[in-house]
Amino acid sequence: MKVLLAFAGLLAVAAANPPVSTGKVVCYYDSNSYVRESQARMLPNDLDPALSFCNYAVYGYAGIQADTYKMVPLNENLDVDRTHANYRTITNFKTKYPGLKVLLSVGGDVDIEDSQKYNLLLESPTAITAFVNSAVLLAEQHGFDGIDLAWQFAKTKPKKIRSTWGSIWHGIKKTFGTTPVDEKESEHREGFTALVRQLKQALSVKPNNLLSITVLPNVNASIYYDVPSIINLVDIVNIAAYDYYTPERNPKEADYTAPIYAPQNRNPLLNADAAVNYWLQSGAPSNKLVLAISSVARTWKLDAESEIAGVPPLHADGPGEAGPYTKVEGKLSYPEVCLKLINPAHQKGMAPHLRKVTDPSKRFGTYAFRLPDDNGEGGLWVSYEDPDTAGQKAAYVKSKNLGGVSIMDLSMDDFRGTCTGDKYPILRAAKYRL
Ligand SMILES: *[C@@H]1O[C@H](CO)[C@@H](O)[C@H](O)[C@H]1NC(C)=O
């Protein structure tokens, strides 16, 4: 009898909690890739070879209309117009991949006009309601299975590198006082909890609708995410634990952009393990947590003052030059990096290739660099994720029993197979190690 009761108890527990699910792969699609040029231009059909590896696809990104607080497409003509209708093109992939769930994400650091609207919205119950109603409608109209909130909270201040002049200026600023990053932190935290609650309720009209949240880089989760209040309402927490160091935030110092653990003498909070532990220690079930793997490399210029060993952290002189295809300073796609690692036949006129330095400890990541020439030109330092380090992150996720990984995003992975012939090598390597 006792055994029977215990068995019944087990069944009850099993019924109350959804079955533990690990090994998930969440694939972000940045729709801005549609308007990139030549090799970097990705069309929705280029997603096809990736989707058999993905449990979830997340369309990035929708935005918020500043005056109405409604969730809206950021690119009407690409996202929803009859000629392109990319929302529908992506959700239609569910016919070919019946297990695939497709979410629509809002924010993602690309909705930059009137960026204060993300704070103001959380201060107003009417705005929250307007947002929630429009979000559910937008998802419904285009066949999405739910919403991902990649909320644009205020970011932490980057570390300062002080030259002598810098310290004098710092002294002056101190006397006048500095404004905190976000004066209404607790109000925004409470507003976000209210928003999650309402959105969950509104999405529940369809039993299979999903709600996920993405914690964007350099957002301090312990300030904005009230884990005990929201964790039961969300299906996935995607932790974007990368861009701890970027050439925009840290122009004078290059360092590992997405270490799993803290390298020596660094801030112990700025790494994936610390970010994951915040959620676990606050009571989040491990299988809801997804760790992001960024396919975007971060690059800095090296100059004559940079230490010649190349070991981070090292002096840098701002963002490295833009890539040939993605054309943004300080950023390269994975295929742009892999092409810089080889120099076929040492062609004249081509910049010398980068030297790749792997990390035998598998804790911090890979970098590659090239020192400046005698004229002080051409120096470059790149922190990036490759198939090996993506695999290491997946192995970390598995060892911690987390829900899975996300790839942020597919368009910056090698979707054409330029590096080795295999399409989506970062995605594949991560999937393989889960
Ligand atoms: C995040 O905020 C907490 C206070 O809530 C603070 O102790 C911690 O240092 C902050 N983390 C970072 C990385 O700034």
Image (tube, rainbow, N blue to C red):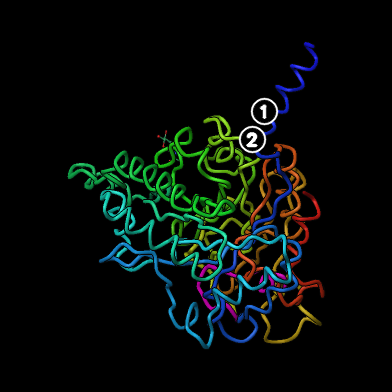
Q: Which residue is mark 2?
A: 17
Residue appearing at x 79%, y 11% in the figure: 1
Nearer to us in this view, 272 or 134: 134
Is 302 above or below relative to 285? Answer: below
Residue appearing at x 72%, y 87% in the figure: 348
The local secondary structure at tag 1 comes to helix
What residue type is disc 2 on?
A: Asn
Q: Is residue 177 visible?
A: yes
Residue 320 % position (x, y): 53, 69
Q: Which residue is mark 1?
A: 13
Residue 14 % position (x, y): 70, 32
For ligand 1, give the image quadrant: top left
Residue 241 % position (x, y): 56, 49
Q: Does the magenta portion include 328?
A: yes
Some atom of ligand 1 lies within 8 Å of the CB belonging to the residue at label 1: no
Nearer to us in this view, 220 or 125: 125
Is 421 above or below relative to 254? Answer: below
Nearer to us in this view, 276 or 199: 199
Contact, mark 1 vs mark 2 (Cβ under 8 Å): yes
Give the number of callouts.
2
Highlighted range, magenta: 325-338
